Image (cartoon, rainbow, N blue to C red):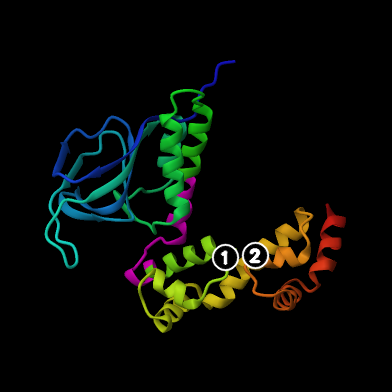
Amino acid sequence: MTYTAPCHVYTAGFSFHRKPFHMSRADGVQNYLLRLQTEGRSRTRIDGVLSSVEAGDLMLFAPNDPYYLSIDKETYSAGKPRVESGDYHIFCGGPWIEEWWNRKHRPAVLRLPLSDHFLGLFRQLVLEQRRLSDSSPEITACYLQILCMEIDRLMTEQPAISPKGYLAYRMKQYVEEHAAIPFRLEDVAGYVDISVSRAVHLFKEAFGTSIVKYVNDVRLEMARERITFSPMPLEHVSETCGFANYTYFHRLFRGRFGMSPRQYRVYSREQM
């Protein structure tokens, strides 16, 4: 059976520059390019203006888009000027990618939080592309499609992100990625290097709810899923979903779903 991939990854890799690097293609690149700045900074031209590309910035270029990239010495906090720039880059194409690209306007540079989840998609795609044996174009195509759909979701969740909104969004991602383990408000605030009071204010302003309530909501959804689909003891569900004790979990669960965890397990399985 011949597999016809809906999208193709032509090149995928990670680069770290410690020497100046320059690339200029007035006629553009041949394929679609997704380039995620992971460390340091670089520069590109957007509408003829030279713009800084910071860690967390995703560059998006279609075939024949003019492409310019410059990596030079930069002065970082409390240090001498140096060259330091890391990035994931994916050159890709195919009918699925073309259709995805044309669904909406794609800015040349999109600022995104550098979450472990988002970085993991790039990392996994690069590792799959590097396989010398047992390589699978089907798996590579699926990873690329998931990455593109995740980009769309991030664009929808933060259509016009401000500096304050960017901090709030990074805190939200921290909560979602660490919900299964206990952590404090100080940990959330420290992740974006601001005070607890400012973190609480920015989160409430951006999402209309408190950090504590959002943490509990995420954990309760995790617990509801495990109660329904796993044989895990209820006390273990509480522990593995980040709750400090079962009594607290029981009270929150009943308040959210209108029945105890044990009652919900019986009810949910009757509905399956």
Residue 102 visible: no
**Percent coordinates x, y for residue 6 in the rendering:** 49, 29
Residue 223 visible: yes
Report the amino acid beneath label 1.
Answer: Ala
**Percent coordinates x, y for residue 238 in the rendering:** 70, 67
**Percent coordinates x, y for residue 232 in the rendering:** 76, 58
Q: Main secondary structure of the magenta part?
A: helix
Proximity of marks 2 and 1: CB atoms separated by less than 8 Å: yes
Label 2, residues with CA under 10 Å away: few <14, some 14-19, many ≥20: many
Which residues are drawn in magenta? Answer: 149-166
168 in relation to 95, above or below: below
Please state which of residues 102 and 124 is positioned toward the viewer in this rendering: 124
The residue carrying mark 2 is: 241
Q: Kindly identify which numbered label has been placed on residue 209.
A: none
| Residue lying farthest to the bottom in this orientation | 197
**Percent coordinates x, y for residue 93 in the rendering:** 39, 31
The residue carrying mark 1 is: 179
Q: Is residue 214 left or right of residue 164?
A: right
